[in-house]
Amino acid sequence: MKSETDDAIPFRALVESLVDHVFIIDDNGRYLYSNQPEAMLTWPAGKSLVGRTVTEVFTPEISGRFLAGFRRVSRSGRAVSFEYQPESTDNSVRCVNTTLFPIYLPDNRQVVGGISRDVTRQKDIEKQLVQSQKMEALGTLVAGVAHEINNPINLIIFNLPLIERVFRDFIPFLERHLEGGADQRFGGLSFDFLKENLPKLIVDTKMAADRVARIVTGLKDFAQKSNPAEKKPVQINKAVENAIRLGGAALHKKKADLSLKLAPDLPLIVANLQNLEQVVLNLVINAFQAIDHDKGQVVVETRLAPSGDAVQIVVKDNGRGINPRMVKKIFDPFATDRRSDGGTGLGLSVSYNLVKAHNGHITFETEQGRGTAFTVNLPLESPYPLYRVMVVDDDAAFRRMLKQAILRNIQCEVEAVSSGAEALIRLGSDPPDALVLDMFMPEIDGLEVCRAIKNELGLERTRVLIITGFPNHPNLAEATRMGFSMIFPKPLRLREFIESLKGCLHGKYP
């Protein structure tokens, strides 16, 4: 005959083997049972919790949350959950989720059971996901803003030197023909004042316009995603060495020593070498700028991640650390406390996006007055398709059909958009290898998109295939004169179109 004790043995063995902390406490907060996994507690390992109270185990703040949870469970008869951060001996920040629930004993006495689980890793992943989603949305917005600002600011920069030359050529003419003498006023200002100060005003305006242009370039870099077709096996140490060489002249002027600790024989990763160089250079420059004393040290280290499935780049400095007010928004565009020194706050946000485009992630640890360490994790295996194709057509059914046909026949990533305006924004932030473009759409049509591609630096490598239901329209002749000669009439001969698209992607056609 089987006893109750026999039934309890496998149950107890199961509970004792759990990594979660399973416990029972009474109405005084005293432990009646605990499987006591050390990962969840600051109580000395091996010492029994039974008979102790939560006030002996935890800080007043945490034990107060346990007791408040107990009262809520007793009143409502329902489970309650809360999170807390236990004290740590290694300065790490951990997060524990605890659920309390009612247990009714045979004598009608109620106690509370609980399960505590370490959710630190889950919280880290959630933070990365939120940051990733925020940066993706910002990237789309920034691409549109940069596109709209780029043309007028270029016009200002182009026209200012001309205005300056014209004014200088006008000065002798005005001096000879000035009717009211040197005291004659223009716009409320005397000629002598304008002669002396207007060139400086023009120079100052040009400097301001150049600064706006640099910010726009930074915005475009921030929005730019790495093209999977341009990725190839890369040795991470080469990216670090190239970045240090590229920034050598600027870095030598800083009051800090730079040392490299590059692990030998690291496995290759699939990456864009120029993108990685930019990430390293941004982090190193940021590290130098954080140092405000004469004993500065910056260390760049490469290593295999402890998990073995990624390589890491670590950039450490012994500078002032990150301002606590900036910690939560350090990767946001324009987030900087060095604006008075000329910083735009785009370096870290650009680096974040480039690392994300390589399916990696970037983290940091900082301590006020002691320095900061940024760690870039880059996976050893990349799931990226070889090419990217964008399909632009205002007909939703045709757009879906074409996307499915391309995916069935070509190993690539396909993005489908419904308007020329959306296409221009996407082209500015993430140009594809090939663009499949409907010629006739409302508002911004295919011809306007072709003109933008022709005039925009950086889009010259994008191959364009035009599809149209009006093969004899004058717009097509205009597109052909601009060099866009791959035109396919509707109804589409799908096999011929797919072969032409393959040829474009493989570089057979210009």
Image: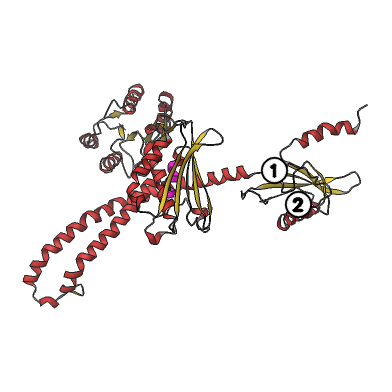
Q: Residue at x 83, y 54 (%)?
A: 28
Q: Which residue is mark 2?
A: 57
Quadrant in the rendering for residue 445: top left
- Check disc 2 and report its element: helix, strand or loop: helix
Quadrant in the rendering for residue 389: top left
Q: Does residue 204 show up magenta in the picture? A: no
- Residue 52: x and y in percent read 81, 50
Quadrant in the rendering for residue 485: top left
Q: How many residues crowd mark 2 within 10 Å: few (<14), some (14–19), many (20+)?
A: some
Image quarter where the N terminus lies is: top right
Q: How many residues crowd mark 1 within 10 Å: few (<14), some (14–19), many (20+)?
A: some
Q: Residue at x 19, y 73 (%)?
A: 193
**Residue 484 vs residue 264: left or right?**
left
Q: Which residues are magenta?
A: 347-354
Q: Residue at x 40, y 27 (%)?
A: 406
Give amino acid for label 1. Ala
Out of 233 and 160, give the one closest to the viewer.
233
- Residue 261: x and y in percent read 46, 41
Q: Which residue is mark 1?
A: 39
**Mark 1 or mark 2: which comes first in sequence?**
1
